[in-house]
Image (cartoon, rainbow, N blue to C red):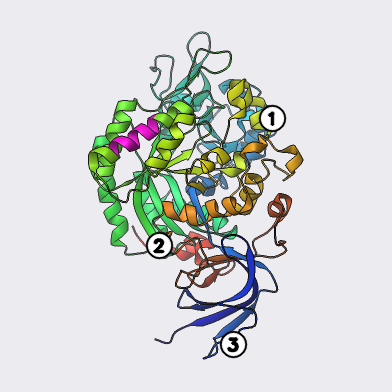
């Protein structure tokens, strides 16, 4: 079979600490040579030559924590992300239900928790909009659900339902569920009650979410929450072809994890049986706690005006035992922890797995780290824990103003998202979007990481001492995130012999300012030496065309 060689000239290549003008010679999906601007045309001549016209070329971005399936499903339901108030959300639901009288349930993803000043939502509001069908809405942070009475009844959530240990059922004065469900222990019965969509529709939603990430320059994705019941759809989509490299993290649950050790191993075998090098399932996801905005993140001191320290999703001993078991089975650990006490429990779990199971290349990840105890910084480094941060969160937006800071009022209000503190302590930071919770754009995330402001204005930085510099922010989105995927020897950098994963971004200056990055646009995403185009990539076609006749 003849070799394919392509030359991309006139680009400004990211070399780890800035841009240098040069050209990329690609051969069979890898970077064969990096050429100086005055280098002669390679011999033999490449099959094609692409003039980049001075555009910036960065390594393909690696998203260390995202939810592409949830993102793809959001595009199909009631568009509640558009709501600017609780009344606005109710109107959107009413209009969507009227336009879709055939749907047995009205489902929506992505409403902003801060559209209510207290983050509390009532079934009776949705009852007035849709009295005859269940309505189930999930917030943009995916930790809160808003249900009407019919949906609560369909899920079996009543006055006599016991309060879960790993969630909160908000109730009225008489003990009846009021319509707000926080965390998995509270809302999983509701999710389970929603009729399951056909496998092909789930695969289509997954590919939609992945295509959105690819369009922003992401070439590798860690899917941070996969349920076994959706695995057939993932396999179906993978058989057809994914627009990104994808690793799956199966969600472990308190009480059921012992059976899951075997179930996840069998699931990973099914993924491996496809023999697709860009599709893996080596990770297990844990939720150590919830979120600050819902009062469910596990914090070491009570929330302001409260005696509550949040809702640990796991008993610390059980979390450590589960982590040890999955680690012994060869899985990578990926733990959601937002509060400082949640972080400590997550680190304890990784430490126990490391001590009990012995040395190996395990590359554990803790995601979010909104609050971190100073004494835990050295432990993160010693245990080689990478922290998957979401730089786009680190800005003073409506959620932070109206919900987050109200719960953290006091000194810790100014210790949130300690990116610089962690980096200076030697903690490896991997960037991620948590898409669809926030934008899938790594460029926008980098812009906020170095400005701590949603418009990129350094003069308006929120907690400016925690800003990252450009080199650190790009590293977090490329080579450091590739480390979490066991791929730092090739991905996340422009180097001879590395896979030809890169993105083209025109218009960036030599030292781009945050506002430039926030406004920049990826015009081409290349993976394995080929451009991924929304118009040609089969992963973006409707699945009734691309998957017809396939079975799982």
Residue 314 in the magenta stretch? The answer is no
Start and end of the magenta stretch?
Answer: 345-353
Residue that label 2 marks: 278
Q: Earlier in the sequence, mark 3 or mark 1?
A: 3
Residue 262 appearing in the image: yes
* Secondary structure category for the residue under label 1: loop
Mark 3 = which residue? Answer: 41
Q: CA distance from mark 1 to mark 2?
A: 42 Å
Please say if the residues under marks 2 and 3 sit with CB atoms less than 8 Å apart.
Answer: no
Mark 3 residue element: loop
Q: Secondary structure at mark 2?
A: loop
Residue 447, image x, y percentages: 66, 49
Q: Of discs 1 and 2, which sits in the foreground?
A: 2
Decide if residue 217 is on the left or right side of residue 269.
Answer: right
Residue 130's place in the image compared with 34, above or below, is above
Identified at 50% across, 45% down, the residue is 70
Query: Can residue 190 be seen in this snapshot?
Result: no
């Amino acid at each position: 079979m003849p070799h394919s060689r392509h030359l991309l000239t006139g680009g400004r290549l990211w070399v780890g600490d800035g841009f240098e003008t040069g050209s990329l010679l690609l051969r069979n999906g890898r970077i064969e040579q990096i050429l100086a601007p005055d280098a002669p045309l390679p011999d033999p001549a490449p099959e094609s030559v692409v003039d980049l016209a001075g555009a910036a070329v960065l390594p393909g971005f690696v998203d260390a924590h995202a939810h592409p399936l949830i993102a793809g499903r959001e595009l199909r339901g009631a568009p509640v992300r558009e709501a600017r108030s609780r009344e606005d959300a109710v109107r959107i639901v009413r209009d969507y239900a009227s336009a879709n009288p055939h749907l047995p349930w009205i489902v929506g993803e992505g409403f902003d928790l801060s559209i209510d000043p207290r983050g509390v939502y009532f079934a009776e509001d949705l009852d007035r909009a849709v009295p005859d069908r269940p309505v189930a809405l999930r917030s943009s942070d995916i930790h809160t659900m808003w249900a009407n009475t019919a949906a609560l009844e369909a899920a079996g959530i009543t006055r006599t339902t016991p309060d879960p240990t790993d969630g909160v059922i908000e109730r009225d004065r008489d003990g009846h569920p009021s319509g707000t469900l926080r965390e998995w222990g509270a809302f999983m019965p509701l999710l389970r009650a929603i009729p399951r969509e056909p496998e092909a529709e789930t695969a289509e939603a997954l590919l939609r979410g992945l295509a959105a990430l690819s369009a922003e320059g992401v070439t590798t994705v860690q899917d941070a929450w996969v349920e076994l019941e959706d695995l057939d759809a993932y396999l179906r989509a993978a058989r057809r072809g994914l627009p990104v490299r994808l690793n799956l993290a199966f969600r472990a649950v308190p009480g059921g994890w012992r059976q899951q050790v075997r179930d996840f191993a069998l699931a990973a075998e099914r993924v491996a049986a496809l023999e697709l090098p860009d599709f893996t399932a080596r990770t297990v996801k844990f939720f150590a706690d919830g979120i600050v905005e819902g009062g469910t993140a596990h914090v070491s001191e009570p929330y302001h005006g409260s005696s509550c320290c949040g809702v640990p999703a796991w008993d610390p001993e059980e979390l450590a035992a589960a982590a040890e078991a999955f680690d012994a089975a060869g899985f990578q650990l990926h733990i959601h922890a937002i509060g400082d006490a949640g972080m400590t429990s997550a680190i304890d779990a990784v430490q126990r797995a490391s001590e009990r199971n012995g040395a190996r290349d395990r590359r554990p990840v803790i995601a979010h780290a909104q609050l971190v105890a100073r004494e835990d910084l050295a432990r993160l480094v010693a245990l080689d824990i990478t922290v998957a941060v979401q730089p786009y969160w680190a800005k003073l937006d409506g959620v932070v103003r109206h919900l987050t800071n109200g719960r953290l009022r006091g000194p810790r209000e100014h210790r949130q998202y300690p990116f610089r503190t962690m980096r200076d302590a030697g903690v490896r930071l991997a960037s991620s979007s948590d898409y669809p919770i926030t934008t899938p754009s790594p460029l926008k995330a980098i812009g906020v990481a170095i400005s701590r402001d949603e418009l990129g204005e350094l003069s308006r930085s929120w907690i400016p001492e925690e800003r990252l510099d450009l080199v650190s922010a790009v590293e977090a989105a490329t080579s450091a995130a590739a480390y979490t995927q066991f791929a730092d020897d090739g991905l996340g950098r422009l180097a001879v012999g590395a896979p030809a994963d890169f993105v083209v971004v025109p218009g960036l200056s030599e030292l781009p300012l945050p506002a430039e990055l926030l406004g920049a646009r990826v015009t081409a995403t290349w993976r394995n030496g080929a451009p991924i185009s929304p118009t040609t990539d089969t992963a973006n076609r409707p699945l009734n065309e691309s998957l017809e006749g396939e079975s799982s």
